[in-house]
Amino acid sequence: MKQVRWAILIPICLFILGVNAAEAAEYAVQAGGVKNGGTVYGRVIFKGTPPPPKMMKVDEDVATCGPDRPSEALLVSKSGGIKNVVLSIEGIQSGKKWDFPKEFVYDQKKCRFVPRVLLIKPKSKGVVLNSDPVGHNFHTVSKGIYNVNKKIKADAKMVVAEDKIRRSGTVRAKCDIHSWMEGWWVVAETPYTVLSDENGNFSIKDIPPGTYKLKIWHEKLGESQQPVVIETGKTTELSINLKL
Ligand SMILES: [Cu+2]
């Protein structure tokens, strides 16, 4: 009997300790902000000639969704800049306050997700809209971060409560009615996480001085890292090349 009790108690204790360890590692906001920070400014460039975008077949609700459309999975500007690359400084335990919106909004418009890639603060609440006159089946795939599979009727919405998005990581969004719909939520670990713009440019400000790894993530080009040195009051410039 005693052995059975320990067999139950030990995993419970380990679970509680594990949860506490995870909480202790959570990002903390520095009171009064970061006074001696530096900036990283950079550009993400596609190396070589990007392939022509794949054409996505629109075979459902064509009157609302429109004709076949090019995939937006890899958006490269004329001068080679890549849009929707997520850049984050790794290993910052404390720093500036979160400048993300308090509540995120993710829309489904003309049978596409808007925006395609959304940055989210962990445990923030939000809403998934359906701005279309047809229904969508909002379906997310993730490793236990936020998994949902729900029909959202025409002009309706789905509220995401604040405790639903459990931790940082990537969540893929799809629609089971319209196979071409693709989107991503990137749940950030710290506010030092940004998206590149349509020219591939990005900047991250108020970084405490130090040597870090810059994590680079793109839905098609994968994940990589680059070292970055941040000095007080200075801007470090980076040029990042990605290829297929
Ligand atoms: Cu849909």
Image (tube, rainbow, N blue to C red):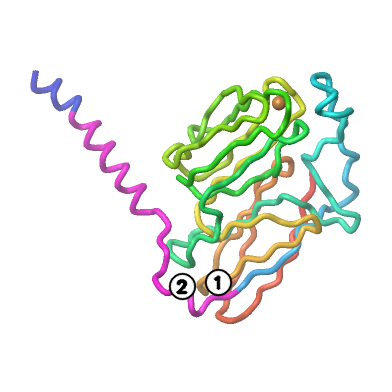
Q: Quadrant of residue 221?
A: top right
Residue at x-position 48% and y-position 79%: 35
Give, as a three-letter code, the residue at label 1. Answer: Asp
Tag 1 and tag 2, C-beta contact below 8 Å: yes
Label 1 sits on a secondary structure element that is strand
Residues under labels 1 and 2: Cα distance? Answer: 8 Å
Q: Nearer the viewer, residue 205 or 138?
A: 138
Q: Is residue 167 left or right of residue 104?
A: left
How crowded pointer 1 is (Cα within 10 Å; few <14, some 14-19, many 20+) is rated as: many
Percent across and percent down for residue 43 are: 75, 62
- Residue 33, numbered circle: 2
Percent across and percent down for residue 241 are: 77, 57
- Residue 206, numbered circle: 1
- Residue 235, numbered circle: none
Q: Nearer the viewer, residue 232 or 175?
A: 175
How crowded pointer 2 is (Cα within 10 Å; few <14, some 14-19, many 20+) is rated as: few
Q: Is residue 126 left or right of residue 31?
A: right
Label 2 sits on a secondary structure element that is loop
Quadrant location of the N terminus in the rendered image: top left
Percent across and percent down for residue 92 are: 48, 62
Is 19 contained in the magenta span?
yes
Give, as a three-letter code, the residue at label 2. Answer: Gly
Range drawn in magenta: 9-38
Residue at x-position 42% and y-position 40%: 163
Q: Is residue 91 above or below residue 183?
A: below
Q: Nearer the viewer, residue 75 or 124?
A: 124
Is 155 contained in the magenta span?
no
Whichever of callouts 1 and 2 sits on the residue coming sooner in the sequence is 2
Disc number lying in front (1 or 2): 2
Residue lying at the far left of the rendered structure: 2
Residue lying at the far bottom of the rendered structure: 233
